[in-house]
Image (spheres, coloured by chain):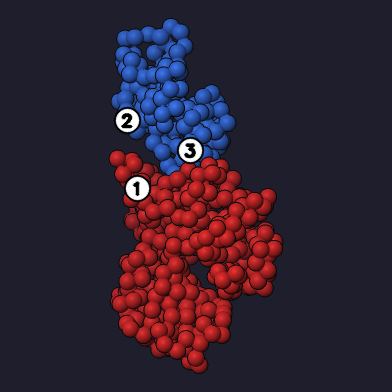
Amino acid sequence: MADQANNSLRKTPLHSLHEEAGGKLVPFAGYEMPVQFEGVKPEHLWTREHAGLFDVSHMGPCFLFLKEGLGEPGAHEKISALIERLVPSAISTLKPGQGRLTVLLNDEGGILDDLIITRMPDENLQGMLYIVVNGAVKQEDWALIRETLGDEAQLQTADDRILVALQGPEAEAVLTPHFPEAADLSFMRCAHVVKDGERYMVSRCGYTGEDGFELLLPNSETGLGYVRKLLADDRVKPIGLGARDSLRLEAGLCLYGHDMDASRTPVEADLQWVIQKSRRARMDFPGAAKILDQMTNGPAQKRVGIRPLERAPAREGTGIHADGLKVGVVTSGGFGPSVDAPIAMGYVRADLAEPGTKIDLMVRGKARAGEVAALPFVKSNYKR
Amino acid sequence: MTQFTQQTTFYTEDHEWVTVHGDLATVGITKFAAEQLGDVVFVETPEVGKTFSKGDEMAVVESVKAASDVYAPLSGEVIDANGALADAPEKVNEHPESEGWFCVIKFSDGAETRNLMDKEAYFEFCKGQ
């Protein structure tokens, strides 16, 4: 049984490296992925102090480009107008090499996924976007994009390549000897590097709250060689999905399928900042009427940070009560190694969303004291 | 009722250890389990006075990773719980089979120990895990 189940799982190009490093492999988003190497807590703390290397090849990198007119004047505006049918962010105003976090929306304004859309830095690649979607829903996302955008644009998947995140205060120092371009990038900026005919994307972003980079590398000996070089650096350790989850929770970042999903709008998820003014004025994105109404009048529920005041962690699914009534639910919860305390995120009735509001967390049926807390739990360390 | 005049330690397939003496049993999780869990951040010990049947969910141990149930290795009544774990859950990692004990049960059927493993059998069992 176990063998059968494992055979249906995909392996990333770094699978054998994970095994060599002693990673504990588990099924995740259709792949066999390392949940931890030496342990969640030491890996988490290492990333906050040094640099952690995460295999995120299970995610959905892709390129979206105009079939005709690539590099011609107005090409970026054309491709932006197409993708803006699905997302509420202003893509047209991105500068070359600039990326933006946004969300794919359904017609009710519900979040189908979160994604980063980057305008290619190269002059001759204007009209091309570099997009990374979540692994668990990549096929659905790509189908939706293809269906909505019609014949003018083509989507080329790149999830057969190596995608790694190097995160932590020492990430820049570790990476620049191999990719000098990295030093010049500020947060959410991307370089497109061509070396010996192979293509690399180096983006200054990540999902830990720390400074760091995401690298899309060719699935070749050279690409793999860079991963080995990074791992050979004393400042770098391989980090599993367990610490990735605790790091992003401390950073107050949403995990798709947990802290946001098709039943939540960006306003409820406290992500209204992904909707730039120009798009609000145009009201031309899916679910715009509902989303703008919530922006004006407030949503019924809102995503907040939560601090259990006792030591018991409040895990996903824990009911949130106030005055004996259910007022919300925890959508991510655990222990934050850097804050050395249990932390959580969840949705509460909007009138209870103010930090400091006392709530009860129904951990295994028992009410335990908690309070609404400001996000993030750990101050972000991005290079602006 | 079976009485254990000497202190004997048994192990369960769920990685609890049970040290019996007379009609009392001290329960905790094994070193193997503590290592698998990683850093323990919270332990919910059972309330004194509660009774459990063998196999009931009796306590919860939470690591950085996840919450795991601890099952009653024997039927009986809880007569003591390790209050020190409330403030120092890390004792479960540091000394899982001594200071990191969870509770003491006054057990009702000593024959239930027959299904438990001795140290050697448990050691073999862990190899297959």
Chain corresponding to blue in the figure: B
Which one is nearer the viewer's eye here, A19 or A236? A19
Neighbourhood count class around disc 3 (C-alpha, 10 Å): few under 14, some 14–19, many 20 upward? many
Q: Nearer the viewer, mark 2 or mark 3?
A: 3
Identity of the residue furthest to the top in this view: B5
Q: Is residue A119 above or below residue B115?
A: below
On-image quarter of the N terminus of chain A: top left
- Disc number at residue B56? 2
Q: In this view, does B62 lie above or below A100?
A: above
Among numbered discs 2 and 3, the one appearing first in the sequence: 3
Residue A234 visible in image: yes
Which one is nearer the viewer's eye here, A85 or A255? A85
Disc 3 is placed on an element classified as helix
Which one is nearer the viewer's eye here, A204 or A233? A233
Marks 1 and 3 belong to one chain: no
Query: Which percent across, then down, holds residue B18?
Result: 43, 21
The residue beneath circle 1 is A7
Residues under labels 2 and 3: Cα distance? 20 Å
Residues under labels 2 and 1: Cα distance? 35 Å
Residue A109 visible in image: no
Amino acid at circle 3: Leu
User: Does A146 sit left or right of A233 as displayed?
Assistant: left
Drawing shade for chain A: red
Amino acid at circle 1: Asn
The residue beneath circle 3 is B37
